């Protein structure tokens, strides 16, 4: 009979070897993802132009907005990141806030004042500052739309912390009497400039964040809109039309699609929607799910990467825009 100590030693050695092999495999996967990040940098660009100025008073049937000093019936404020500000739009009419304000004016027959507090590049960490700025400049708006989340993923922020910060902002606005609608994190799996399996990894993080955002929004008294599944099929079907030239931000058509999903929820929350029942959209993107790689492998990679928070994989990946901008500037200089 084999001594117990020898059996234990052999078993322990086998465990160490297996663990070492798994660790080596995951590090190899990590290096592979980093190589994919480098590839993405060469494809994803960055629109450094300032989003079009869109604030003003929008009336039913108006051709051009009136200045902010004109009388209005309802004040709509936009908070969030570059998508909330309309990065990628070329004229004010394409900005999502304008589309929502015009739609709200037509639906209610009222004069809608649009104010934008959103800042390109913002994460959920910046929401409190945007809300602070609102309280400094005047009373809380009647309605607010928040679009935030993609940058939290690219900067690898904690999902729980990001959702909590969003919930706190929603709660502050709700307590001040504002009707709040939140477009949760979009499906990053539609960004085809990011190769697989890296695209599936960041997509997984984004969808987990979206679910946490929806829960935090409801807890804060707001109304979440699951943009991931609502927009993913269209973006996957026609990326050339739905994305702006930087292949990251939506185009005018992409923003129009998002506004069409946000407007009914906002109008209904204000008691002004007359377009019929609004169905609840799923938070899981079935369209992108069909294109995913092995869920088991992706989950294993996610667990591995979460254990190594010092490796800013996602930040490196989708920060490709910054690298692309600097490289383009260097090329022009030479």
Image: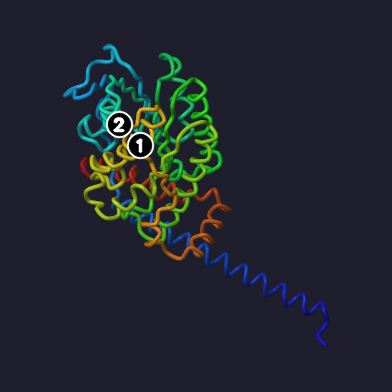
Label 2 crowding class (10 Å Cα cut-off): few <14, some 14-19, many 20+? Answer: many
> Is 61 placed above or below 159 here?
above
The quadrant in which residue 19 appears is bottom right
> Is 196 placed above or below 44 here?
below
Rendered-image quadrant of the C terminus: top left
**As drawn, which residue projects farthest toward the left?**
63
Residue occupied by mark 1? 262
Residue 100 is labelled as 2
Scheme of image coloration: rainbow
Question: Going 55% across and 52% down the picture, which residue do you hit?
Answer: 306
Q: Left of 255 or right of it: where is 159?
A: right
Residue 277 place in picture, x, y as percent: 37, 40
Question: Going 26% across and 46% down the picture, which residue do you hit?
Answer: 243
Residue nearer the viewer, 44 or 151: 151
Rendered-image quadrant of the N terminus: bottom right
Question: Going 26% across and 52% down the picture, which residue do you hit?
Answer: 239
Label 1 crowding class (10 Å Cα cut-off): few <14, some 14-19, many 20+? Answer: many
């Amino acid at each position: 009979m084999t001594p117990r100590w020898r059996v234990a030693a052999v078993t322990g050695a086998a465990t160490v070897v297996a663990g070492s092999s798994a660790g080596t495999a995951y590090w190899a996967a990590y290096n592979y993802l980093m190589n994919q990040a480098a590839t993405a940098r060469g494809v994803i660009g960055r629109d450094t132009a300032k989003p079009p100025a869109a604030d003003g008073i929008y009336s039913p049937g108006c051709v051009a907005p009136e200045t902010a000093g004109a009388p209005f019936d309802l004040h709509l404020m936009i908070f969030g990141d570059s998508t909330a500000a309309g990065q990628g739009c070329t004229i004010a009419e394409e900005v999502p806030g304008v589309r929502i304000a015009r739609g709200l004016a037509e639906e209610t027959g009222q004069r809608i004042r649009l104010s934008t507090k959103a800042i390109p590049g913002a994460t959920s960490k910046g929401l409190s500052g945007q809300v602070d700025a609102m309280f400094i400049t005047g009373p809380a708006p009647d309605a607010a739309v928040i679009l935030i989340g993609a940058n939290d993923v690219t900067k690898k922020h904690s999902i729980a912390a990001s959702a909590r910060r969003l919930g706190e902002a929603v709660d502050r606005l709700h307590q001040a009497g504002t009707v709040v609608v939140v477009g949760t994190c979009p499906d990053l799996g539609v960004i085809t400039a990011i190769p697989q399996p890296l695209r599936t990894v960041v997509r997984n993080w984004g969808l987990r964040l979206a679910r946490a955002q929806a829960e935090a929004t409801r807890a804060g008294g707001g109304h979440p809109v699951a943009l991931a599944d609502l927009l993913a099929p269209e973006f996957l079907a026609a990326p050339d039309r739905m994305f702006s030239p930087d292949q990251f931000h939506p185009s005018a058509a992409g923003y129009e699609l998002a506004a069409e999903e946000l407007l009914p929820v906002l109008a209904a929350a204000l008691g002004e929607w007359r377009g019929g029942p609004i169905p609840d959209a799923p938070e899981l993107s079935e369209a992108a799910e069909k294109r995913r790689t092995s869920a088991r492998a992706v989950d294993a990679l996610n667990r591995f990467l979460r254990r190594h928070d010092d490796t800013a994989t996602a930040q490196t990946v989708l920060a490709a825009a910054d690298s692309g901008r600097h490289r383009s500037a260097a090329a022009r200089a030479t």
